[in-house]
Amino acid sequence: MDGSSAEKGLGKLALLSNVNMDYAVRMLAKETEVYRPEGYGNELGVLINPESSYHAFRPDITFLLVDLMELLGHELDLERAAEKIGGWFSQLAGGLREGEVYYVNDAWLWGVELGAAADPGRKAALEGLWQARLEELCRSRANVRIFPYRHVIETLGEERAFSLKTWYMGKVLHSSEALKRLWGLILEKARWEVRVPRKVLLLDLDNTLWGGLAGERDHSPIALSEDHEGLAYKNLQRVLAQMQEQGVLLGIVSKNNQEDAMEILQEHPHMLLRPCAFAARRINWEPKHENVREIAKELNLGLDSIVFWDDSPAERQLVREMLPQVAVPDFPERPEELAPAMVEIHRNYFARPVVTREDREKTAQYGALAQTKKLQEESGSFEEYLERLETRACRVDPGKNLERLVQLMNKTNQFNLTTQRYTQGQLAQLLQDAGKQVYLYQVRDKFGDHGIVAAAVADCSGMVPVITDFVMSCRIMGKNIEYALVEDMEADLRGRGYGRLRGRYVPTSKNSPAASLYERLGYSKVQGTAEGGSEYEICLKDVPVRKHCVRMEQGLKA
């Protein structure tokens, strides 16, 4: 890609609709490369026809924005509407391609006749028919997402969102304000597909997670309740709880007496986030930037994974100056703005297009990481620590875990041998390539399941296969697990008849932890690469003994 598409990294987009969306397409074209549809109302025709200009364009992401009333032809009978909606989704499912990403809008039924309808529940029932089929499609196809069209209409209201004047003039259903919001939302979703989200949100306590001061609550009770100012703080916690469920790691960095703060965290009846909700805590009187740095080290994450939120302008400025990699959003002036401000922080730094099982279990996984560090401190040697961890790994099916494979390849930086990035479509094609072997690994230890945490690609198109990609989650680094995973790949390729194997390393500003991997594994450097890296080689019948305590479980698992 070149031009703005290369700068923003959004890929090629398509917007298909049964109403006139030309304005939104023109606005999108200012930001990235966009398919120019030949009119409107043939959204399924161009998608199903392999010879269409849409397929010649080969979009990375397709947005299908369908007006339900137009699709129904103003047919409000539930049975006949169900047939039309079912037929539309059946045709759509037949035209979807593996590896490409599709956003389909949820429904909002709008038409002038609804104002005179005798059955006000009919609107919701018809929207429900669409929603049920849409959710069914999303469950069966991992590359289909729901586009939140309803939210745009609800936010604006029907009178501001729709325009009969432009509809009569040129089948432009939406007002200019609604179209601006729709194209902005399309861009946001496209950016979510390619960006690396932040991982950790570090929070102050006093006047942030609750109102008032923990140590003064005998004289002035803290504000945290179901009414007045206290409800504003509780609603903030409700937003934070939703973020945590989607994989955001929460942490505390607060200047308090630990006993006072922990009493509120553990016992306050309106406290929604108990101590177990936080992956790391620093409740002390040390400088906050030092506490932030310590938490990054504890979680084995870069500072650029962290967002810091504090009501004190002085503390925010200190962190900005001392730790410029950390994101430090502004803090709202009034309590009623807390929850909306956190929703915006979630959108700007943390939201992702798909929430995987690994995302949902992230807090527990980092809790297990803390336990492993405690075990390391208690062990007499590194070897004893590895033995006591009882680590097990198994290969899993990359085809059944494509979303997680995409996440690992595109979000991992520290242990990433070449830092190549792939679209979902490219990875789907790679899985079908007979000249490539894709490896995906799940890891467990005595403290729990770390989920799918490592991936590799071997190019087997030549006489000597080459590991062109190898990534591993930072939370399992430092345990020699990579030794076992490379040995598994070596054994697999040896079983396929190969006598030698090469591995590639390309240095970046962040992947120095992986720089010496092949040398530690006993590979010899054979040549440089065009990207400024190196290739290493080993004879597969002469691999050395490597020290690790990982038991490989046989058999592919879903």
Image (spheres, grey):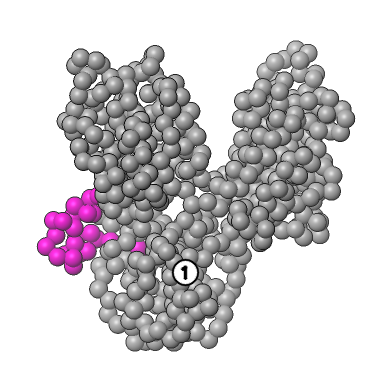
Q: Name the residue at 53% across, 86% down.
A: 463
Q: Quadrant of residue 210?
A: top left
Q: Quadrant of residue 100?
A: bottom right
Residue 274's place in the image compared with 24, above or below, is above
Residue at image point 70% right, 15% down: 120
Q: Residue at x 18, y 58 (%)?
A: 376
Toward the left, the furthest residue is: 380
Percent across and percent down for residue 269 are 28, 21
Amino acid type, residue under disc 1 in the picture: Thr
Whether residue 389 appears in magenta in the rendering, the answer is yes
Q: Judging from the image, what secondary structure is the residue with disc 1 in? A: loop
Residue 489 colored in magenta in the image: no
Magenta part, dominant SS:
helix
Closest to the observer, 165 or 326: 326
Packing grade of label 1 (10 A; few <14, some 14-19, many >=20) is many
> In the shown orientation, is residue 528 left or right of residue 266?
right
Q: Position of residue 193 (x, y in %)?
A: 56, 50
- Image quarter in which the N terminus is found: bottom right
Please tell me how many numbered marks the rendered image carries: 1
Which residues make up the magenta segment? 370-395
Q: Is 149 on the left or on the right of 486, as rendered? A: right
Question: Where in the figure is residue 82, as x and y percent of width and height?
Answer: 73, 32
* 50 versus 275 height, above or below: below
Residue in the foreground of this view, choosing between 105 and 213: 213
Q: Is residue 475 left or right of residue 68?
A: left
- From the image, tell me which residue sits under label 1: 418
Q: Residue at x 58, y 57 (%)?
A: 424
Q: Is residue 340 visible?
A: yes
Residue 360: x, y in percent? 41, 44
